[in-house]
Amino acid sequence: METQKETIYGDKDFQCYKIGRIGVIKIIKNIFKIVTDLPESSNFISVMNDLENDKTVDAILLLNEKESLGNEEYLTYMKQVLAHNEMGKEWSNIEITNRKTRTRELVILNTIITKIVLSEKLIVTGLRGEIVTPFFGAALATDIRFATEDVVFLLSHLQMNIHPSGALPFFLPRYIGHAKASQILFNREKVTVTEAMELGIIQEILPIENYEELCIEKINRILLKGENVISCTKKLLNFNFEDLDNYLGMEECNYIRR
C-alpha cells in the first residue's frame, strides 16, 4: 500500500511534506530569494527545524526541480548584487553593489549547511540538473547524495571571479583529497555526474523518471538498519567536520565582501 503524502508547507518557491518516516523539502525555484529574503529564509529554516524536532521523522530528503539550482538562477542573482565587466563568459572588475543581500546569502546558506551537519536525522539529497558552486558545497554537507543522469556540477565561481561558497573548499578535499579538490576548484568548469560518481561524491545515479520515489525507497531501506546505528554512525562520520564552524566564521569575516 502506497504511503500517503502529508503536506506541511508549500509556496511557489519550495514545498515540505512527509511520506511515512521521511520529511521532504523540495526547492521549486527562486533559491536565491529563499537565502536572501528574510521572511522566506525564516520559513525555510522553520520548516527544517520542524522536521528536526518531529519524532515521527527519521530522515530528511532534500530535492530540487531541474533548473532551480542552476547557472541561470545564479547569474540572475549575482547581476543584482555585483557590478562587473564581461569578457566573453568571464567576469572582471567586480564590485559588490548590494552588500546587504550578498551578506544575507552567505550567512543564511552557511546557517542551513550547519543545520544539515548538526542534524540528528539522516539527511539525503536527490539532485537534478545543473548544480552551481554554492549548492555543490551544500550537497556535500548531507549524509548521502543521489543524482539523476542529467546532473552536472558547475564551478560557476570561476566564471564570476568570486570565491567558491557553500563551504565547497571545506568539504570537497575531505572527500577526494586536497590535490584533486584544488584541480577542480581552480581549473574545472564542470564535473559531470559520471565523474562525480567515480570520485565517490555521489552514491548512485538514478533515472529521471520516478527519481523521487526511488530516493524514498532507498532511504526506507537504510532506515531498516535501525535508529541507533544510523544516529551513532552519523555522529562519528561528522566528527570529520568538527572545524566547520571555524571555516564558516573565517569565510564570513574575510570573503563576505568579495
Image (cartoon, grey):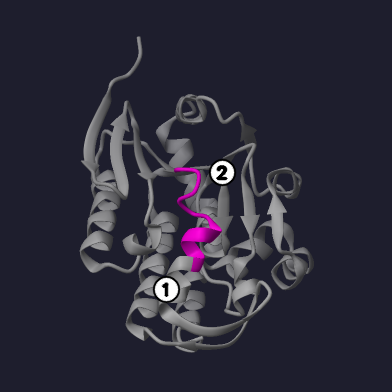
Q: Can residue 239 be seen in this view?
A: no
Image quadrant where residue 8 sits: top left
Quarter of the image that includes the N terminus: top left
Q: Residue 156 — which label?
A: none
Q: Mark 2 points at which residue?
A: 145
Q: Residue at x 59, y 75 (%)?
A: 160
Pinpoint residue 156: horizontal percent, then vertical percent. Answer: 61, 67
Pinpoint residue 77: horizontal percent, then vertical percent. Answer: 43, 69
Image side of residue 103 versus residue 146, left or right: left
User: Marks 1/2: CA distance?
Assistant: 22 Å
Q: Which residue is drawn at 47% across and 60% down?
A: 73
User: Callout 2, which amino acid?
Assistant: Arg
In the rendered structure, does residue 244 fall within the stretch colored magenta?
no
Q: Nearer the viewer, residue 88 or 227?
A: 88
**Crowd class of label 2 (few under 14; some 14 to 19; many from 20; radius 10 Å):** many
Q: Which residue is drawn at 68% across and 65% down?
A: 173
Pinpoint residue 250: horizontal percent, then vertical percent. Answer: 49, 83
Q: Residue at x 55, y 61 (%)?
A: 137
Give the extent of the magenta segment. Answer: 65-75
Number of callouts: 2
Say what secondary structure mark 1 lies in. helix
In the rendered structure, does residue 69 fall within the stretch colored magenta?
yes
Image side of residue 108 versus residue 139, left or right: left
Q: Residue 106 — which label?
A: 1
Say what secondary structure mark 2 lies in. strand
Q: Do the numbered discs 1 and 2 sit on residues whose CB atoms are within 8 Å?
A: no
Image side of residue 47 versus residue 159, left or right: left
User: Callout 1, which amino acid?
Assistant: Leu
